[in-house]
Amino acid sequence: MGPLRALVRTARMARHTSRLAAGLPDDDEVLLDAPDERLGPALVAAGRGEYAPAAKLLATTREAAEWENRDRYALRLTAFAHTRGEWLRAWQAAAPHDPDVLLIKAELAVARGWHSPARVELLREVGPLIAAAAEAEPRDPVPWRIALDHARGTGLGHSGFERLWAEAVHRSPHHYGCHVSALKYLSASWYGSHRECFDFAERAAEDALPGSLVRALPVRAVFAYLAEGGGAVIPRARLDEAADGAIALSAEYAPGDPWPAEVRNLLTYVLVRLERWPDALTQLRMIGPYATSFPWDRVSDDPLGQFLQLRDGVRLEVACSIPLRARPERPARAEG
């Protein structure tokens, strides 16, 4: 970089960066993996060793067929039980055949197996637990999402994977968690290829319902591709098209909505890797205070710190692109 260019860049940063903080919450207002108003009380009670609120929450999602919420809550409760499991042990003792207990038990066994050096052997022992969860509530797609994760860990072949996938989509054709698990299986890191991964993601997004997070599945494929180092296998236009689709989906939700927060965090990561700085800043404003561990925990042991550092970096990059005499547009204020 020549001296004059460096001087102009520094001047632009000094002039515009502070103004670009408009629409972004302060660092101390940003939360990592903040639970929603339904999950929060269940986690607090679990911290006291009480299982009743978690049991009621999962029973409600099962009875109302809220499969997306059920999957999210099951994952968060399982993560909590991984380090603080007194409440779950009490629940299992009180209701060993409860479909919701069986679901958490299966998810926890898979999670523990993944973190063991003897992963394949341990995961193969978990199969009966997943089957029990699936049999306890035949309508529920979440045990089949667990089964798809399990298949990836045990090295199940494509024909076996396809049988599991058929069971999952039979119960919920557009279930986001099942699609994410299938995409991971089909990625180049596991048992597919970059092209196979993108083809699957794009077909799913085209078939998804309006507002469905499955419409952002191609951005997951981009993330997997970039995490593997990228290259010339997938054209840049295909990467940008995936990002554009996720931007359109993000626009369907209000700024600061916690429901699409993980998709927005992932989209921001992809936009930064593609050096689409203004689009990334827009998504950071849409995220508001809801940072999520994924994808930042894939690049740092401090995901919240990584997110906050990235926000500053994006502002600097956008500031450097604005002419000295220009004034950056302020984001529209959110309603409500």
Image: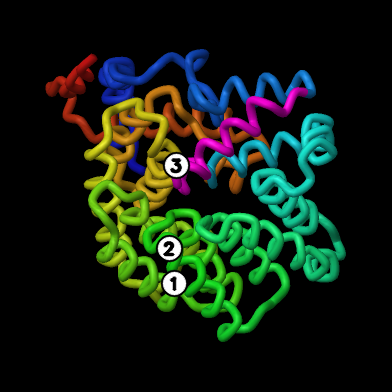
**Dot 1 or dot 3, earlier in sequence:** 3
Chain part drawn in magenta: 50-69
Task: Confirm whether the magenta stretch covers residue 71.
Answer: no
- Say which residue appears at 38% left-offset and 40% top-offset: 264
Quarter of the image with the N terminus in it:
top left
Q: Quadrant of residue 151?
A: bottom right
Residue 333 coordinates in the image, percent (x, y): 20, 17
Task: Confirm whether the magenta stretch covers residue 57.
Answer: yes
Residue 10 coordinates in the image, percent (x, y): 34, 26
**Mark 1, other Cα within 10 Å: few <14 / some 14–19 / many ≥20:** many
Q: Which residue is mark 2?
A: 221
Q: Is residue 325 above or below residue 140?
A: above
Q: Depth-wise, is mark 2 or mark 3 nearer the camera?
A: 3
Residue 197 badge: 1
269 to the left or right of 326: right
Q: For marks 1 and 2, give the CA distance.
A: 6 Å
**Dot 2 or dot 3, earlier in sequence:** 3
Disc 3 marks a residue whose amino acid type is: Ala
Q: Which residue is mark 3?
A: 64
**Mark 2, other Cα within 10 Å: few <14 / some 14–19 / many ≥20:** many
- Say which residue appears at 32% left-offset and 36% top-offset: 283
Quarter of the image with the C terminus in it:
top left
283 to the left or right of 43: left
